[in-house]
Amino acid sequence: MDERITRRSVLAKLGGLAAVALGAEAWQSDAEAGAGPAAVAAGLVTCVLTPEQTEGPYYIANEHVRSNITEGRPGTPLTLHTTVVSASSCKPIKGAAVDVWHADASGTYSGVLGNSGTFMRGIQKTNAKGVALFQTVYPGWYQGRTVHIHVKVHVGGNVVHTGQLYFPDTLTDAVYLKAPYSSRPARTTRNANDSVYRNGGSKSMLTVHKSGSGYVAAIMMGVQRS
């Protein structure tokens, strides 16, 4: 039986963050619709939420396979749920390697520009539901860019997605009122005037909610296997 995704079933099942994080549980079978790239183009399959965006200058290959990427650096706790599904069928992809990296609370990247360590960098394999989870901190800002997380997805040894993930400006404003973010001057770039964000960044916006002293963020990435 062919696969399809219906707006009603998605809205019903994506009513909470857990459903977003576990993405694959939202998909239903329906004999009336097609699947594959044609279904994506027709809007019958709508799991392709994150566009390709530039890798940026600070990628380092072969980082540690680990869930906690903070290395003890300070910042507001952030749990990042990334769900990888097939863009053709919206089925979860097990065993995909999700590779993330971002600035720490001070706006510093590890391993580049003379900085040591491997903080805020790591790789996780997706589970049977297509989910890879990271424990990190809310990213800091640096000159010329809005707040973001870089991501690559590898399947079968091939890079199948390169993108950047974003946060609502109002949420970032609230987070930055507290230490250690509050010790820095007001950030200079917001989403609307970020040159990378303007190229499809609104489709890479994380879904975020408060959890204890930190936040939980989630995104679904529809990818082609090759």
Image: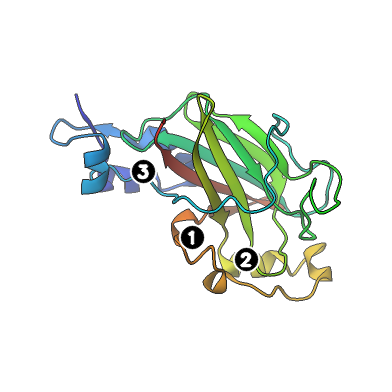
Q: Earlier in the sequence, mark 3 or mark 2?
A: 3
What residue do we see at 52% from left, 45% from top? Answer: 162
Q: Residue 47 shows which numbered tag?
A: 3
Identify residue type, mark 2.
Thr
Q: Is residue 44 visible?
A: yes
For the residues labelled 1 and 3, the Cα–Cα distance comes to: 16 Å
The local secondary structure at tag 2 comes to: loop
Q: Is residue 146 left or right of residue 137?
A: left
Q: Given contact means CB atoms under 8 Å apart, are the residues at marks 1 and 2 in contact?
A: yes
Q: Is residue 192 left or right of residue 47?
A: right
Check disc 1 and report the residue beneath it. 201
Question: How packed is label 3: few (under 14 Cα within 10 Å), some, or many (20 or more)?
Answer: many
Query: Where 93 sits versus 134, above or below?
Result: above
Mark 3 or 2, which is nearer the eye? Answer: 2
Query: Where 185 sits versus 61, above or below?
Result: below
The local secondary structure at tag 1 comes to: helix
Mark 1 or 3, which is nearer the eye? Answer: 1
Across and down, in percent, residue 211 comes to 64, 50
What residue do we see at 83% from left, 48% from top? Answer: 73
